Every structure is written in C-alpha cells, then in structure tokens.
Image: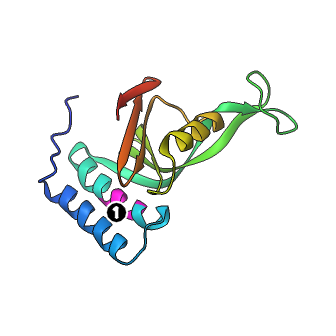
C-alpha cells in the first residue's frame, strides 16, 4: 500500500488544527479534549480505505499476567488493554492502533509505559497535539 497523500493544506488537517486552536483558546487542552480532534482526522482519512475508527478499542496485550496478577512471560493470560482507537476494516481486521496523549505528557515516557503494559508495536501511532510517533514492525517508522 502506498503512503496516504495527506498534506497540511488538505481540509481534514486544517479542521484538526482549527479544532486544536479552539481548544487552546478556551484552555481545554487535556487529552480528553484534544483526542476528539485527532479522532475526527482519523475518521476522515481512513474512509477512502473503507476502514473505520473504533474508539476505546479493547484488545489483548503482549504481556502476560500470572495467577496472582504478577507479570510473567510464560504463565497466565494476556492482559486486557484499551487503546484510544483502532482502524478496522469491514471484516474487523485491525490495521493499526492509536494512543492519544496531551501536550503536557512526556510522549517518550508514555510510550515506554504502554510498551511495558504490553501494547504491541506492530502498527501503532502514539500521538499528542505537537508530535506523533509511529511504530511499525517493533521499531519507529516515523517521528
């Protein structure tokens, strides 16, 4: 699949930045507020691929929990986690996960925490209003 031809001048991107500006103007800069603007951008951009954004997507992480809740690589079941969103097609195949953070978060530290919890790094975007880090195949593809 080729790269999505998204540019800063495209309407969905302009709408994203306009929404962020409104949130900032009224001091609504928490993740809960700014996340909705990026969700709208994702919804607009995934539709040409016939994908859908499923918000608050639950999945099983890569880390396992033991019988007493302690982490172990060989015992117990995989931990149930929730991403801010997943891009899913009509047959429910997940094409990528999305984790939102706000501008006050230390994005690398938040990524580290999510990795430790068992978030897969196969295709996940960690995003804040000022930065996005895309992991693909367990390494940073874009920052």
Task: Judge left or right: residue 74 versus residue 102.
Answer: right
For the residue labelled by badge 1, is the local secondary structure a helix, a strand or a loop? helix
Q: Report x, y in % for residue 46.
A: 27, 48
| Image height of 98 relative to 122, above or below | below
Q: Report x, y in % for residue 113.
A: 61, 40
Residue identified by numbered label 1: 37
| Image height of 30 relative to 105, above or below | below
| Image height of 110 relative to 134, above or below | below
Question: How many C-alpha atoms fall within 10 Å of the one at disc 1: few (<14), some, or many (≥20)?
Answer: many
Q: Report x, y in % for residue 55.
A: 46, 56
Residue at the location (26% across, 61% down)? 16
Q: Report x, y in % for residue 82.
A: 57, 49
Specify how the rendered protein is coloured. rainbow
Quadrant of the drawing holding the N terminus: top left
Range covered by the magenta-colored residues: 35-40
How many numbered marks appear?
1
Which residue appears farthest toward the bottom when viewing the image?
26
Q: Nearer the viewer, residue 51 or 131?
A: 131
Q: Quadrant of residue 49?
A: top left
Quadrant of the drawing holding the C terminus: top left
Task: Judge left or right: residue 137 versus residue 143.
Answer: right
């Amino acid at each position: 699949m080729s790269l999505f031809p998204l540019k800063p001048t495209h309407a969905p991107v302009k709408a994203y930045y306009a929404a962020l500006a409104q949130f900032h103007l009224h001091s609504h800069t928490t993740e809960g507020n700014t996340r909705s603007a990026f969700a709208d951008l994702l919804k607009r951009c995934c539709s040409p691929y016939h994908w859908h954004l499923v918000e608050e997507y639950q999945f099983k992480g890569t880390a396992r929990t033991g019988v007493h809740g302690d982490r172990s690589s060989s015992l117990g079941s995989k931990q149930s986690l929730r991403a801010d969103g997943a891009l899913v097609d009509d047959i429910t195949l997940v094409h990528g996960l999305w984790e939102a953070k706000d501008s006050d978060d230390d994005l690398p530290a938040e990524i580290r925490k999510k990795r430790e919890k068992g978030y897969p790094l196969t295709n996940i975007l960690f995003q804040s209003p000022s930065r996005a880090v895309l992991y693909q195949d367990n390494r940073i593809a874009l920052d």
